[in-house]
Image (cartoon, rainbow, N blue to C red):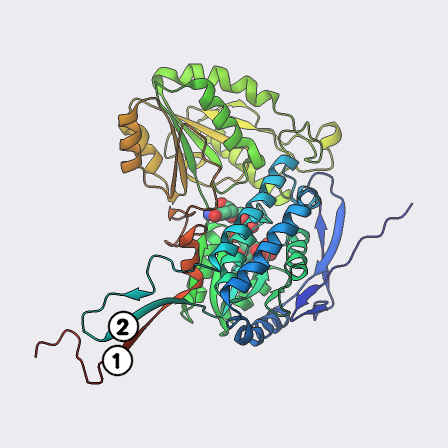
Amino acid sequence: MTTTVNVYQNYIGGQWQAAQSGQTFPNYNPASGEILGYFPLSGEADANAAVAAARAAYGKWRLVPAPKRGEILFRVGELLKQHKEELARTMTQEMGKVLKETRGDVQEGIDMAYYMGGEGRRLFGHSVPVVPVELPNKSGVAMRDSIGVVACITPWNFPMAIPTWKMFPALVAGNTIVFKPASDTPLSALRLVEILYEAGLPEGVVSIVFGPGGTVGEALLHNPDVAVISFTGSTESGRHVAIEAAKSLKRVSLEMGGKNAVIVMDDADLNLAVEGILWSAYGTTGQRCTACSRVIVHSAVRKQLVDMLVPRIEQLRLGNGLDESVDVGPVINASQLTKIHSYTEIGKEEGAKLVTGGYIDNGGELAQGYFYRPTLFTKVRPNMRIAQEEIFGPVLSMIEVPSFEEAIAVNNNTKFGLSSAIYTQDINRVQRAMRDITTGILYVNSGTTGAEIQFPFGGTRGTGNGHREAGIAGLDVFTEWKVVYTDYSGKLQKAQIDE
Ligand code: NAP
């Protein structure tokens, strides 16, 4: 029996189009090696055509009343809800994480659609429309203005949520979009764009271009008609994006890597801590920007924590994420598998103790996929590479500390600052952690993952450039403040001048 594999196209300015080169690239299932489809191997010309289409659509879209733009997002939310299961299955097939997590990924998109749909009737940010002014018979209005063409460049680990976190605020604010999704997850991205149009988005407002970051992404960084780059990905790529985009003074929002820690104090509820560590270290196969990759444990409970954690890690079942009994899916691709294993070797060379895992698992049903056994290192020192560098896989490093103060210092001593967690029963320690941990997100008595869309999301240092996604703060990247003063006194009034 032969099965046909679909060949997909870019959607530019309301037209389905092959790449101008005529070439395609395959989309693989990382659990089975199966080819799910072929996508256009686009280049600079395709990216520039998409920017031109977005530029052309901008004039009309910015004038569509914001509540109407919001209504389209409400319909998008309904459609995402309706197609939640099928979207989740597509995502599991192309990037591997288990179904309950891909359902959660779609849910984040649904939540964001409703949240940003509501912004269509607000959009007032932190200000009030008429601000007090210092002169009589004069008024001032501070309003959020759209900016223009936004390029959304996204990673593969949240193929639905991350694009919605960028596109929905950008759209409700009146911008048009060129969407360049990760090459590992093109199909979920395409489905999202189809839903946007099914919900009534006018043609041209969003274009999607598939192809490598090195060509399509690069073209977007250099196109003068792109006003904003919203990027999520590795710190290495993000730094490059910032440098290139700065040359034409584009606005750039960067959401990048993490080296997130769970702190377990001597008074922690260890049962709770074990659950939180397992979920945030090995969920999504450790491939979350907020994944826990360090446990900083007080000496008094280290042995007990290890004894409780190891059997639970060893029970985790690897396999195809479509199987509901599987806990941990494959990693995204062969090069990531190699990279993860190289860190196991680095950890051993550095003198850390490999307690469990540490190998590529290709036995039985796992033979065709990219599976890595959930791994735990103990006796890790804070400056080892496995405690400092983002591995982006199911590898956890445990660092023992003698005190709360030392735990905070170790937590803060990385070049990233996305998410941290602390397990303690002591309210004073909680307050001090809130004050002293340098991070974008802090969880108390919960693991490092689980952000909700109504709060700002992002990190410090090498994780970001100060912008935030989601919540009201998520609008700041996609809007420009415009202030209009109207003097109705009929004479020249001079602000700040003593007369
Ligand atoms: P990546 O390799 O940096 O790729 C991210 C996106 O950038 C992809 O669409 C990629 O295209 C594109 N790209 C690559 N080179 C580019 C260039 N020169 N110019 C323009 N675009 C370029 O990251 P990834 O491996 O997909 O994702 C994993 C990383 O994302 C991890 O570091 C993780 O921590 C981070 N992440 C951060 C957050 C956050 O919110 N802080 C959330 C999720 C993930 P191709 O796919 O074609 O290479």
Residue placed under numbered mark 2 in the picture? 139
- For badge 1, the amino acid type reads Tyr
**Vertical arrangement, residue 379 with respect to residue 419, above or below:** above
| Disc 2 CB within 8 Å of nearest ligand 1 atom | no
Residue drawn at (17%, 79%), measured in percent from left and top? 494
- For badge 2, the amino acid type reads Ser
Which quadrant is home to the C terminus?
bottom left
Farthest-out residue, bottom: 491
Residue placed under numbered mark 1 in the picture? 488
Label 2: element kind: strand
Which quadrant is home to the N terminus?
top right
**Vertical arrangement, residue 277 with respect to residue 226, above or below:** above
- Marks 2 and 1: in contact by CB < 8 Å? yes
Farthest-out residue, left: 499
Label 1: element kind: loop
Q: Position of residue 239 (x, y in %)?
A: 43, 56
Whichever of labels 1 and 2 marks the residue nearer the N terminus, that label is: 2
Where on the picture, by quarter, is residue 381? top left
Residue drawn at (64%, 63%), measured in percent from left and top? 200
**Vertical arrangement, residue 413 with respect to residue 297, above or below:** below
Please name whichever residue, 339 or 399, is drawn nearer the observer in this view of the structure: 399
